[in-house]
Image: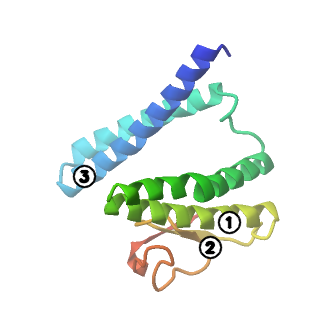
């Protein structure tokens, strides 16, 4: 792929992925405000944006979906890198600028990403193959566990009712 087109494909992927999540948040707000038809519209358009993002991702060779072993290894490396390199820098900048709320969010994300890396590493080593039936995701900070829901999130301290169960 030519450089400018590749750059545009990547930008389009990022834009569509951001739109997907933004529209889902808008749908939640519309639901909370008891406007179900608008919430439904936001979810429908979000799904269309997901389709766009997936098509763009498939065009880009560096973010294309590969075999599961490769996808696990790539995911592990990304989680490890972001938790050890990027989030610490984000956290430092927020602290330096006195942005306490951003610092807390960045700190939680950094710590949660470290747990994500450990889960990927276990999957790579086949420790969790065919044994995990569900995961529990903290809806405050993004911590994930394959154990029972903790009494409080080890990253942010959220109570059990803040966890969402993801099962197969």
Picture disc at residue 146: 2
**Is residue 168 visible to us here?**
no
The answer to whether residue 71 is above or below residue 159 is above
Label 1 crowd (10 A; few <14 / some 14-19 / many >=20): some
User: Mark 1 or mark 2, which is nearer the start of the sequence?
Assistant: 1
Is 145 placed left or right of 132 in the picture? Answer: left
Residue plotted at (65% across, 53% down): 81
Residue 121 is situated, as x and y percent measured from the top left of the image, at: 74, 63
Question: Could you say which quadrant of the image residue 158 lies in?
Answer: bottom left
Tell me, yes or no, whether the two marked residues, 2 and 1, touch with CB atoms within 8 Å.
Answer: yes
What distance separates the C-alpha of mark 1 from that of mark 3?
32 Å
**Is residue 157 visible to us here?**
yes
User: Mark 3 or mark 2, which is nearer the start of the sequence?
Assistant: 3
Residue matched to label 3 = 29
Residue 10 is situated, as x and y percent measured from the top left of the image, at: 56, 28
Q: Which residue is nearer to you in this view: 137 or 110? A: 110
User: Mark 3 or mark 1, which is nearer the start of the sequence?
Assistant: 3
Q: Quadrant of the C terminus?
A: bottom right
Q: Which colour scheme is used?
A: rainbow
Q: Which residue is nearer to you in this view: 33 or 143? A: 143
Residue plotted at (31% across, 40% down): 42
The answer to whether residue 52 is above or below residue 84 is above
Residue plotted at (36% across, 47% down): 24
Picture disc at residue 161: none
Q: In which quarter of the image is the N terminus?
A: top right
Residue matched to label 1 = 119
- SS assignment at label 2: loop
Residue 36 is situated, as x and y percent measured from the top left of the image, at: 23, 49
What distance separates the C-alpha of mark 2 from that of mark 3?
29 Å
């Amino acid at each position: 792929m030519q450089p400018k087109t590749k750059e545009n494909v990547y930008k389009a992927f990022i834009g569509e992925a951001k739109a997907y999540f933004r529209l889902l948040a808008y749908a939640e707000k519309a639901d909370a405000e008891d406007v179900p038809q608008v919430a439904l519209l936001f979810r429908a358009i979000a799904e269309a944006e997901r389709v766009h993002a997936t098509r763009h991702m498939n065009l880009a060779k560096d973010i294309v979906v590969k075999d599961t072993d490769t996808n696990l290894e790539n995911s592990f490396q990304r989680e490890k890198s972001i938790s050890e390199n990027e989030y610490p820098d984000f956290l430092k900048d927020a602290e330096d600028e006195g942005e306490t709320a951003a610092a807390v969010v960045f700190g939680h994300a950094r710590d949660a990403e470290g747990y994500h890396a450990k889960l990927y590493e276990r999957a790579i080593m086949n420790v969790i193959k065919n044994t995990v039936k569900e995961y529990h995701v903290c809806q405050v900070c993004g911590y994930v566990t394959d154990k029972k829901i903790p009494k409080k999130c080890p990253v942010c301290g959220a109570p059990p009712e803040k966890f969402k169960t993801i099962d197969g």
